[in-house]
Amino acid sequence: MTALSKKFRFVSSDRRVREDRRFVVGKGRFAADIVLPAARHVAVVTCDHPAARILRIDKTAALALPGVHYVLDGRELASATSPLLAGLDTPNVPRRPLAVDVARYSGEWVAAVVADTRALAEDAAERVAVDYEPLPFVLDGEDAYAPGSSLVHEAHGSNVLLDRTFVWGEVEQDFAASPHRLSYQVRWGRSSTVPVETFGVLASWDPWREVLDVFASVQMPRFPDQVALALKLPGSSVRVYNDVDVGGSYGVKRGIKHAVLAGYLSRRLGFPVRLIEDRLENMRAGDAHGPERNFDLEVAFDDAGVIRSMKMRALDNVGAYAGRSPFQLGKPVSAIVGPYLIKSVQYRAIAVTSNKTVQEAVRAFGQAPTNYAIERALEEVACHRGLDRLEVRRRNLIRAEQFPYLIPSGTTYDSGDYHAVIDKVLAKADYAGLVAERDRLRGKGLLAGIGIAACLEPSGANSTFEPLLNPKNETTTYSESCRINVDVSGAVTATIHTLSAGQGHETLVGTVIGEVLEIDPDRIRVVRPDSLASLPSQSPVGSRMAIMLGGAAFHAANKIKDKLVAIAAHDLGVPVERITYKDGNAYDTSAPDQKRSWAELVTMAHRHIHKLPDGMEPGLSVSHIMPVPLGGGLPTADGRVQMYPCYSFEFHLILLTIDPDLGKPEIKRYLLGHDCGTVINPKIVRGMTIGGIAHGIGAALYEEFAYDAQGQLLAQSLMDYLLPSAHEVPPVEIIHHVTPSPHTVFGQKGSGESGYLGAPAAVANAINDALKPLGISTNSLPIKISKLGDMIAAAQEKHKKRRAKESR
């Protein structure tokens, strides 16, 4: 922390996270914990083909089982519902909870069985007989993009959902003027967050009140609206309960098809319906896969390794339907040059369908793959020029005096001091000693490398990537809100309007309101009403809640304080300007003995209307709906846009070894320099950052939703989809730096996606540094142990043959 944080009483203090208390003692309230009388359970019937026409669904044997109530197929559901909302304008790529006539990936849901128990529903699902006609399929993204490939959606006439090229600045001139250029390819493998809790939903239709009650482990914007649209209900007929804890998410808990399916069945059958994914359902068809992206990059640079221009082609294989994933090519526009002084950019964004599981939003929403591609550029340039990797980064980084800094794609970075963060990390690491330790380990026969990566975290989540990629969508803000009520006893209750997805919102809001009202945050109760009683919220996406929810709470609290000051001034008979507010009490600055206490002010507000200023409403209840700072504008015709208001910075430094016989990597030391502006709660930031680093290590080394040539997902359990454990995630040394944002109430920036944004690049760069003595490298993630072992063995055999030849 810097001295800046000392001006706060509660903000930046290392206070406990209030949510932790209930989770540690097992008192969380998750979707699977909700019990409604007479609820029945759903199991789904899935397609085993990557593409197939559904010829017949025979339900007879399943319905003959005692305790089985219904078998629903896609045609019936489609006749009563609308397609799920898609981000792009792709009317010929409809997406529904159950496949209609054609199934388009292995694992896609084709029918749903409702029974008294989950076990019985599963047994019945196995008795549903489906006749298929297998169809041609395509798995690889480049193959899907190629002319003449098998079509995933024949009516669309192509597998291409998006193919747009942006040019910002004088790209061709900058390339022509640069003495050096190089091109390379980068691959980011398909992975996800894979939370411990799979998606769960319990839906109950009340025909007398005409309301669908929904309890779900959801994290996404506009969930109630989208459920209502699909079920053809008014928005006021869907009530989502926000007081449900979410057991991990970071983007993947969208669950629209789950909720629509359960909601329809509850209305159709007249009793509550529960759908809880098992791990296989979640992995095969949970709509929770992340980006699978191929990059082609070309950079132009000078003798000193300063990059002048970049051309990037990014092709994303989004799976069988146009979900939220094509927009993951839009967010990187907001930080398309990373933290670097790249003058001009050509960016081609391509999204294609294939016969794989649907992608959805995953932590960082497509920014982490782009950061990896950019960081590989810095490594390639340094290698090409024979320069030190750190020095190349220093020369390319935006300098502190250049902020606010406008990048070619039209976004202005708010603040930063990237060089200072790096200097802190190098000093903490004893960088010269770290290099010596790497060389010592190499001398012992290990492959050892140092990995570095610098990257940005766009935060504040505006919505302008939507109209950027879909001009028919003119959404220009993601608002957030907070309501505060002070009751007649003086107790403070704040309401927030989204589910608890693990980011410590209750602690955040309590801290912010406590800071403004100068009362202990633990005295402030934070509650979550249902969606029908809620103000607008867009949920915790895009590292936005410290900025947006914190900002809404700040402004609402100031409205309360302003009202208290006005009441005190009126009662004391002095101008408002003479009132000093401190510790919940209001003083006459000219006569400090003349004051009104918190209790007196609250009582007057609620009960003594004769003591209130003329026209003032009694009571102490206010709300504030906050738009995104710098938001409100549509993209220009050439795609320039201010997408996010704030930009956090990370600098990763890793020492890693590889056992040359096994190909097994081990991270010996991990340091992270982190600047997310003013930190509101250090424990929350640290937890999210370490979790993000663990996620990034997994994406770099272990995790992948791989498919075989027959279109079958190979990773169908946690035995096959490898997650890093405590053995693979080392202790992390976090070095903080604070450059406050000028656009937020305390100078805070986002940190919800921190760690993950740079960890994959840093690990990959460490791997390549370790492999350098063998003359080999890789630009493809994940770098699995089997792959590493084969690469090392092949290189060693090559060296062995060369030495044998030279000795003859």
Image (tube, helix red, strand yellow):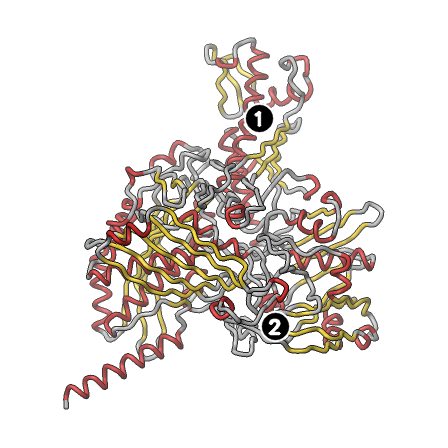
Q: State whether residue 790 is above or below residue 274.
A: below
Q: Secondary structure at mark 1?
A: helix
Residue 2 lies left or right of residue 220; in this view the side is left
- Regarding residue 32, the answer to whether it shows in the image is no
- Tell which circle, 2 or 1, labels the residue nearer the N-terminal end: 2
Amino acid at pointer 2: Ser
Residue 746 lies left or right of residue 77; in this view the side is left
Residue 493 lies left or right of residue 408; in this view the side is right
Name the image quarter holding the N terminus.
Answer: top left
Which is nearer the eye, 315 or 739? 315
Which is nearer the eye, 634 or 76? 634
List the residue tagged with mark 1.
Answer: 560
Q: State whether residue 787 is above or below residue 676.
A: below
C-alpha distance separating marks 2 and 1: 55 Å
Q: Position of residue 602 (x, y in %)?
A: 62, 23
Q: For residue 418, what is the image quadrant?
A: top left
Q: Residues within 10 Å of mark 1 (few under 14, many from 20)?
A: many
Residue 106's tag is 2
Q: Position of residue 236 (x, y in %)?
A: 74, 43
Amino acid at pointer 1: Ile
Residue for point 47% across, 56% down: 366
Residue 453's tag is none
Residue 483 lies left or right of residue 330; in this view the side is right
